[in-house]
Amino acid sequence: MARGKPGKAQLDLVSDIFSLMQKPEDYVSDGVDVRNYGELSGLPAAKRLFAEILGCRPEQVFVGGNASLQLMYDTISKAYTHGLLHSERPWCREPVVKFLCPAPGYDRHFKVTESFGFELVTIPMTDEGPDMDAVEKAIQDPAVKGMWNVPKYSNPDGIIYSAETIRRIASMKPAAPDFLLMWDNAYCIHEFEGDYVEFPDILAE
């Protein structure tokens, strides 16, 4: 079963886009010829566009050509083999690595960390998001290196983190200096139905 694949009628809606680019100069953006490999962190124009949509600065945007799960896997993989900015050593050299998993949650997230041998720590979900008392207690353990989050319409229950939960997450003081907050905010700018639901931006918090 394929999930989220558009129908032919949806694909036909964007067919005209393929005839917009006619001349070589049409493919130049901020001095970068996009027919080549582009820029490592993404085209500046794309970074400016998404910064405006996401309410952050262009230099905070990384534009990748792959699915978000692949980017998340790569982040965990780099932490495992090399460590992160504030890591004392690569995570593969730690006696044990634990990762917080709000549950019910997204099984594909959990599988990423499980595949590296991490100990998955279940955090109960509430109507406000993860049980923050449990989170704040768990992060006192320096072996806890991170936490998965789907803050808006969390999979599978559709919970939206409350403003208070987001504030508490943003103000956490984990014992691990290289604690990694995985913030998979896939639905930040669109809704399934009804009006747009405002909630605090984690970067601003």
Image: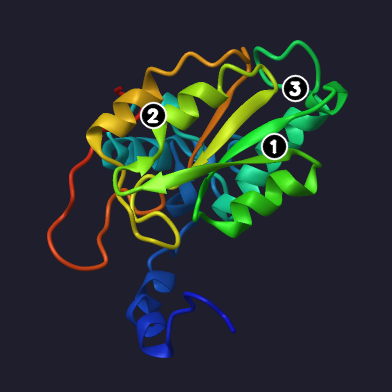
Quadrant of the image containing the C terminus: top left
Residue 58 image label: 2
On screen, residue 25 versus residue 200, left or right, reads right
- Could you tell whether 34 is left or right of 19 in the image? right
Along the line of sight, which residue is nearer the eye, 152 or 12?
152
Q: Secondary structure at mark 1?
A: helix
Q: Is residue 177 above or below residue 93?
A: above
Q: CA distance from mark 1 to mark 3?
A: 9 Å
Query: Distance from label 2 to label 3 (Cα)?
Result: 25 Å
Name the residue rendered at 80%, 15% in the picture.
89
CA–CA distance between discs 2 and 1? 23 Å
The residue wearing badge 3 is 83
* Quarter of the figure with residue 130: top left
The three-letter code of the residue at mark 3 reads Gly
Estimate the x, y position of residue 38 in percent, counting from the top left.
Answer: 59, 42
Taking the spot 18% from the left edge, 50% from the top edge, the residue there is 197
The local crowd at label 3, few if under 14, some if 14 to 19, many if 20 or more residues have their Cα within 10 Å, is: some
* Circle 1 residue: 76
Where residue 64 appears, as percent x and y from the top left, is 56, 45
Sequence-first disc among 2 and 3: 2
Q: Secondary structure at mark 2?
A: helix
Q: Residue at x 39, y 29 (%)?
A: 58
Q: Earlier in the sequence, mark 2 or mark 1?
A: 2
In the displayed structure image, the side of residue 90 where residue 3 appears, left or right: left
Callout 2 amino acid: Pro
Looking at this view, is 192 or 155 the one in front? 155
Instruction: Estimate the x, y position of residue 156 in percent, counting from the top left.
Output: 44, 63
